[in-house]
Image (cartoon, rainbow, N blue to C red):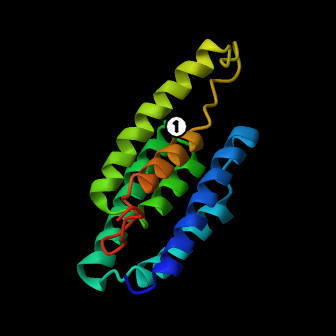
Amino acid sequence: MPNALLTYGLLAALAIALAVAAATDIATRRISNRLSAAIALAAPLFWWASGLSLWPGVAVQLALAAVTLALCAGLFAIRAMGGGDVKLLAALALWIEPAAFARLVVAMALLGGVLTLLMIAGGGRRRGRKPLAVPYGVAIAAAGLWVLASGALGPEGAAPIAG
């Protein structure tokens, strides 16, 4: 790997950013646009540090993020997903290779379902006026951290920690 120290430093920063996203989503039910933008803008540095090729590597990551953004924007349009969640997931797609991203999406859906059930069981649904506001950024962040910790550390070329 061309710049292992920088690569791992960027991955640590991504992990911290995901933890911040989860914490702020719990506290405020919002994920900062600046945080999602920082994650997205750091991805090219990660690609360079991990030695990702422009073709097909970077092109695949950009396509994955574009498809994620388009699909999630559709979910946002029908009020099935929050805007901050859409941006966070699309930014995260820039970092994680497609097969690992598919695992992330499955884990995110499962964790989001469990989180929703826990909130309902805990009396989280408000009667009458407002629907249940699930901090889905928690599920996105937890799934992202799980994928990072499982050794799928991003685009091809990033070496696993326990290698």
> Which residue position holds label 1?
79
Toward the left, the furthest residue is 56
Instruction: Identify the residue at horizontal 34%, vertical 80% (top origin).
Output: 52
Please, is residue 16 above or below residue 1 in the view?
above
Q: Is residue 40 visible?
A: no
> Quarter-wise, where is residue 156 in the image?
bottom left
Please, is residue 40 above or below residue 93 in the view?
below
Instruction: Identify the residue at horizontal 42%, vertical 36% (top origin).
Output: 109
Relative side of 63 to 38, left or right: left
Instruction: Identify the residue at horizontal 46%, vertical 79% (top origin).
Output: 4
Image position, residue 140 (x, y; %) = 51, 46
Relative side of 163 to 80, left or right: left
Please, is residue 53 above or below residue 23 in the view?
below
Secondary structure category for the residue under label 1: loop
Image position, residue 130 (x, y; %) = 68, 23
Instruction: Identify the residue at horizontal 75%, vertical 42% (top origin).
Output: 28
Q: Amino acid at mark 1?
A: Arg
Image position, residue 58 (x, y; %) = 33, 77
Toward the front, the furthest residue is 163
> Quarter-wise, where is residue 34 in the image?
bottom right
Task: Tell me if mark 1 has few (under 14), some (14-19) or many (20+) residues whose alpha carbon lies within 10 angstroms of its own.
Answer: few
Toward the right, the furthest residue is 27
Image position, residue 55 (x, y; %) = 25, 82
